[in-house]
Image: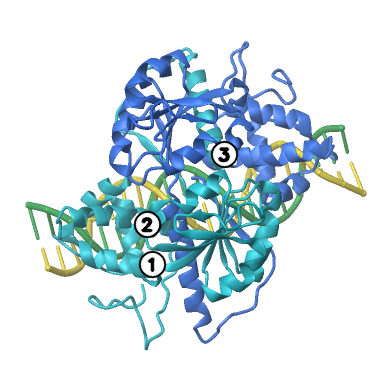
Chain colours: A cyan, B blue, C yellow, D green
Amino acid sequence: MSQQRHGSTPGETDGVPAFPDLPEATIARLPEYLRALHHLAETGAETVSSEGLAAAAGVNSAKLRKDLSHLGSYGTRGVGYDVALLVYQIEYILGLDKNRAVCLVGVGNLGHALAGYAGFASRGFRVVALFDADERKVGEEINGLIVQHIDDLQRIAAEESIAIGVIATPPGTAQLVADALIAAGVTSILNFAPGVLSVPSNVDVRKVDLAIELQILSFHEHRKASLTALPGGRSAPAESGNQEAVGS
Amino acid sequence: MSQQRHGSTPGETDGVPAFPDLPEATIARLPEYLRALHHLAETGAETVSSEGLAAAAGVNSAKLRKDLSHLGSYGTRGVGYDVALLVYQIEYILGLDKNRAVCLVGVGNLGHALAGYAGFASRGFRVVALFDADERKVGEEINGLIVQHIDDLQRIAAEESIAIGVIATPPGTAQLVADALIAAGVTSILNFAPGVLSVPSNVDVRKVDLAIELQILSFHEHRKASLTALPGGRSAPAESGNQEAVGS
DNA sequence: ACATGTGAAAGGCTTCACAGCC
DNA sequence: GGCTGTGAAGCCTTTCACATGT
């Protein structure tokens, strides 16, 4: 890759950090590696081999090594990777040192739960504002935050310099909310509402549709059922499973 | 329908539908096509072109046609696809005509919301049982269902012939719950707990980790920020966005 | 005329296998 | 000896462009 620089921050030339362009598939796995590394660090491990980390993250070691090689050369041959250093590098690449501010729009059934989800805070994100269009919900306190009216989004987004917007509204209003977020300067959206959002190309959208996940599982149930019904019918389990992680 | 015999229903020999083996990438998109088709059906459309359906589903038309071609030949050249027929075919392939029973384990913050999520029922899934290990939660009623103790999982899973288990527990207990589900005969799991599950190879696991989604967005924020800081600095939006759907 | 279905080309990702380094 | 980093091979997915059918 660029130039290596063992102890130091990934290839910066003179204050400007040059960005290694990682394959999307790699990016999607870095968070999982990071979680596994944190877990290892807690158990006191100082270094870990590609084999060990790969197992903890649920991938094979060749893939892991290739992924990490894109970040630069942070392992030691014959030894493995320094856990603390790798944590630092991955957090840097993912921009987690910035402790990004997140807002959530739509405090219904699902939104309510997301507002209180401990996993966000513990992994580098601060939920700083909640919005809803329903006057009856405005003013309600959830997890220490007051629900604000959606009309105040523009102002508050600027005040809090919000980086990421989470949409948890019914499908019908998701596009309107996305437009409002974008108008407020938000360029990253996590969308829980079914359906497609149309956004300018500088905005990144990730979509989580819970029903789609079940439908994909349903397909595999259907497939498995149709196989057992056939001549060469299988029935016995083999070993060690196929985990299909969600994430593009 | 089943014996459409257009170009031939995907190889059925004599009543037993042999399973077309679809690429995983295609499977992951079928639910989105289905949602778009239902939407079109509501607006009264009888047929739709690959161009039209692709736009509604947020993909390009070549990809859509290739995907649908794997199901068989259900379009008419010069005309397009029959909406009702395509809905039926996709629902059949996904096994949605089976109205599968789902159970949910872990009625905490997130689990509580999932138990009440209307999107499941409306898209072919019945949540039929809720479980938790916490005695204080057992007996609680959520959305018309009583929370049961996890020790009753085995019995109830059999009674209700549960097809899919959803795990919404803290990370520490997810593997135990997965083991229990598998022992109870469940072969499809949707896991919301961070971390990797180890399961036999006949079990399918899909994983949704909300923090990971934010971390991926954070990466893109970081990348965009580092680009605008560079010489050839961009700033202007182009058009029509990049939607990265989540789904392996 | 129009829109599907599909070979063929292009691109991306994963896996292999081993050279290079500790 | 052991383990990383990486070219090369193989596989999967997307895109192109057009023959085919209505």
- Please name the residue shown 32% across and 64% down the image: A69
Label 3: how many residues lie within 10 Å, few (<14), some (14-19) or many (20+)? many
Q: Is residue D1 left or right of residue A77?
A: left
Chain letter of disc 1 in the image? A
Give me the C-alpha separation between circle 3 and circle 2.
22 Å
Q: Quadrant of residue B4?
A: top right
Amino acid on which the number 1 mark rests in the picture: Leu
Judging by the rendered image, the residue that carries numbered circle 2 is A31
- Mark 3 and mark 1 in contact? Answer it, CB < 8 Å: no
Whether residue B73 is visible, yes or no, is no
- Above or below for A76 versus B161: below
Residue B43: x and y in percent read 82, 40
Chain letter of disc 2 in the image? A
Label 1: how many residues lie within 10 Å, few (<14), some (14-19) or many (20+)? some
Residue A84: x and y in percent read 22, 65
In this orientation, which residue lies closer to the viewer: C7 or B101? B101
Judging by the rendered image, the residue that carries numbered circle 3 is A212
Q: Is residue B194 left or right of residue A167?
A: left
Give me the C-alpha separation between circle 1 and circle 2.
10 Å
